[in-house]
Amino acid sequence: MTIISRGFHGRRPPEGTKLPPGQYEATGFPVLSAGPTPHVEKSSWELSVTTEDGRRHTWDWAALMALPSESPTVDLHCVTKWSKFGTEWRGVSLDVLLADVETAAEHALVTSYGGYTTNLPLEDLLDGKAWITYSYGGDDLAPEHGGPARLLVPHLYLWKSAKWVRGIELLESDTPGFWESVGYHNYGDPWREQRYQGD
Ligand SMILES: Nc1nc2c(c(=O)[nH]1)N[C@H]1C(S)=C(S)[C@@H](COP(=O)(O)O)O[C@H]1N2
Ligand SMILES: [Mo]
């Protein structure tokens, strides 16, 4: 695929620092959902990637399982100020899913079963920074945390990690998602404390 790289936006934490500004370490794994948990069966699950010219690529559950997976261990940072260190996931890198997708688009709008949406630059899904995950802590991903599959983009605030992920639309122009259109920051880098518009 053709990507014009404008460099990595995320600021690296200072050596040894794991808490971004304004965050605290949570115990447990809070659940934050804007609506009820949609119950999505693996047998009817489908992920689609749609390009700016309307071409659609789809994977059913078996196709996702057939792809090489990775086991990222990452820290999570929620805009409500909790962070969780060392979470263990299994999933498929977006680099794998997008390898054969031809696009000149620079923007992505991620959609979920249940209607949630979130936007981010396409480059933030690439280069080992994002996964479609289906396992957490060695178990199937629980429905309340986005199972059967969720996007994981740990270098941005956790609202960008769409639970119950269903589609990724690659777009020529940026389109704000659910939280981005009600005042949350368009990009959401926890290290630059980009919580709200204007931060
Ligand atoms: N589909 C969907 N994804 C979502 C949300 C949501 O309401 N719906 N909430 C977001 C927010 S604000 C956060 S903080 C995280 C919470 O993930 P968790 O419930 O697994 O902790 O999911 C994000 N992904
Ligand atoms: Mo959140």
Image (cartoon, grey):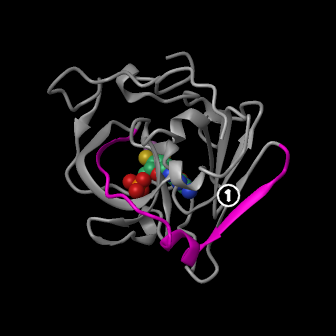
Q: Which residues are magenta?
A: 53-78
Q: Is residue 150 left or right of residue 83?
A: right
- What residue occupies the far bottom of the structure in this picture? 43
Q: Residue at x 47, y 69 (%)?
A: 147
Q: Residue at x 60, y 29 (%)?
A: 183
Q: Is residue 69 left or right of residue 95?
A: left
Q: Position of residue 180 (x, y in %)?
A: 61, 34
Query: Looking at the picture, does residue 139 appear above or below residue 78?
Result: below
Secondary element at tag 1:
loop
Q: In the rendered structure, does residue 189 fall within the stretch colored magenta?
A: no
Query: Looking at the picture, does residue 1 appear above or below residue 64?
Result: above
Q: Quadrant of the N terminus?
A: top right
Q: Which residue is mark 1?
A: 115
Q: Position of residue 126 (x, y in %)?
A: 51, 40
The amino acid type found where label 1 is placed reads Gly
Q: Residue at x 30, y 41 (%)?
A: 82
Q: Position of residue 160 (x, y in %)?
A: 51, 43
Q: Quadrant of ligand 2?
A: top left
**Callout 1: CB less than 8 Å from ligand 1:** yes
Q: Is residue 34 visible from the viewing direction of this image?
A: no
